[in-house]
């Protein structure tokens, strides 16, 4: 009879093992919402990277459309209405969703060395695009500049956060040591706050707060809660540095209006730890995973999903217990997970799709959690979803890449 170590090694070859040793864990039903979008880098204002009631491929999908580009994936595909926006590292390009034809781009033709990072955000027909050291508001249809604000430093892998304020939008973004908020229509500066460290990644909005709190992280490991007037309500230190955007444990209910979840905020650190804080700043839990957590965190159906050292980890959002993990292989670009319906999608050496609960468990083992794995002729990086389709960014390893739309 094989040893437990040998049996686990055999399961590892199949890709998925359990680490929590329980039969309960995470559960979800297939999504039924066929009409949804992904309007910002984190999927929504909470950076949840999730559409918990969304419908998306649950069995091996087909490549429906492809767009080739020069450059490398440098941010999530952003999808809203009939448009898709891509960050290719050397440009930000707006495509027509129907045939992936180019609408407009931001970089002049001779500016191939100029680098772009992060993803745009779209609201009310306006695309807010981080372009080097300048935040630019552009008409979504034509790409025309509506307003622009230059920062003292280039943006660091960040996306604008759009916060609704009645009938108006406020746009929050950080660069260098400054976090700034702008009127979405005029570009007027609403407030600015200098922080103790270089702002990295996108800010996230608290789901409910009398102060209108947003969360933002610095490369040095400071997590801040900043209110609607730019005042710091609290800050906490993560010693190993923060490698992911703050992600709020919240989601919309099936009615599209109600908010579910405790509103805790989760970040991944440079030592492979994942940290969870209450809306008041109290530490909820800390969990160690292999390597270092990076790229982004997805939350939904009671789970926190993060990638570290070639593995996808599923943690219990309430206490941080490890529910299951799966090997996804090495990746040349960030591979943040995306949760749609009852399936978690993530890149790596190929496109992977896992059942939210990790399959069927028996004691410390789980089987049957893999829905599909797809070879896509390159390293799979960012994955997002809209209207039952997956949008997948591919890095070809030769200085160029592609967007694949799968259905």
Image: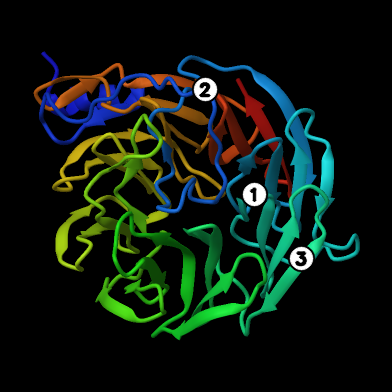
Mark 2 vs mark 3: which is more N-terminal? 2
- Looking at the image, the residue that sits furthest to the right is 110
Say which residue label 2 marks: 34
Picture colour scheme: rainbow
Say which residue label 3 marks: 146
Q: What element carries label 1?
A: loop
Q: Quadrant of residue 342?
A: top left
Percent x, y of residue 402: 71, 38
Say which residue label 1 marks: 73
* Gap in angstroms between the C-alphas marked 1 and 3: 26 Å
**Up-down relation of residue 233 to residue 118 (above or below):** below
Residue 10 or residue 280, whichever sits in front: 280
Percent x, y of residue 124: 63, 50
- Rendered-image quadrant of the N terminus: top left
Q: How crowded is mark 2: few (under 14 residues within 10 Å), some or many (20 or more)?
A: some
- Rendered-image quadrant of the C terminus: top right
Percent x, y of residue 132: 69, 71
* Gap in angstroms between the C-alphas marked 2 and 3: 32 Å
Disc 1 to disc 3: CB gap under 8 Å: no
Mark 1 vs mark 3: which is more N-terminal? 1
**Up-down relation of residue 292 to residue 369 (above or below):** below
| Left or right placement of residue 130 versus residue 144 in this view | left
Residue 158 appears in the rendering = no
Q: Quadrant of residue 157?
A: bottom right
Residue 4 appears in the rendering = yes
């Amino acid at each position: 009879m094989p040893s437990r170590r040998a049996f686990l090694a055999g399961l590892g070859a199949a890709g998925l093992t359990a680490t929590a040793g329980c039969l309960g864990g995470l559960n979800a039903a297939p999504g039924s919402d066929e009409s949804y979008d992904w309007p910002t880098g984190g999927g929504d204002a909470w950076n949840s990277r999730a559409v918990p009631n969304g419908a998306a491929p649950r069995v091996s999908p087909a490549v429906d459309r492809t767009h080739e580009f020069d450059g490398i994936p440098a941010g999530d595909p952003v999808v809203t209405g009939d448009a898709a926006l891509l960050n290719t590292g050397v440009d930000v390009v707006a495509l027509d969703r129907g045939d992936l034809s180019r609408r407009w781009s931001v970089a002049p033709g001779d500016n191939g060395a100029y680098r772009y990072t992060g993803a745009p955000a779209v609201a009310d027909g306006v695309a807010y695009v981080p372009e080097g050291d300048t935040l630019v508001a552009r008409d979504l249809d034509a790409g025309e500049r509506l307003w622009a604000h230059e920062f003292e430093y280039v943006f660091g892998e960040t996306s604008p956060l759009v916060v609704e304020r009645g009938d108006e939008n406020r746009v929050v973004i950080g660069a260098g040591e400054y976090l700034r908020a702008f009127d979405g229509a005029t570009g007027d500066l609403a407030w600015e706050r200098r922080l103790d460290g270089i702002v990295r990644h996108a800010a996230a909005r608290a789901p409910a707060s009398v102060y209108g709190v947003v969360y933002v992280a610095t490369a040095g490991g400071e997590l801040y809660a900043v209110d609607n007037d730019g005042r710091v309500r609290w800050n906490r230190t993560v010693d190993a540095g923060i490698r992911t955007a703050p992600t709020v444990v919240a989601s919309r209910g099936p009615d599209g209006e109600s908010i579910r979840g405790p509103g805790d905020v989760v970040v991944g650190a440079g030592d492979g730890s994942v940290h969870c804080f209450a809306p008041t700043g109290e530490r909820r839990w800390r969990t160690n995973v292999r390597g270092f957590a990076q790229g982004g965190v997805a939350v939904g159906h009671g789970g926190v999903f993060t990638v570290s050292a070639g593995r996808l980890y599923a943690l219990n959002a309430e206490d941080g217990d490890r529910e299951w993990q799966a090997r996804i292989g090495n990746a040349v670009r960030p591979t943040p997970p995306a949760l749609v319906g009852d399936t978690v999608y993530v890149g790596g050496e190929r496109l992977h799709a896992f059942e939210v609960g990790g399959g069927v468990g028996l004691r410390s083992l789980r089987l049957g959690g893999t829905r599909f794995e797809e070879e896509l002729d390159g390293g799979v990086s960012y994955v997002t979803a809209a209207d039952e389709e997956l949008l997948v960014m591919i890095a070809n390893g030769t200085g160029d890449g592609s967007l694949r739309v799968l259905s």
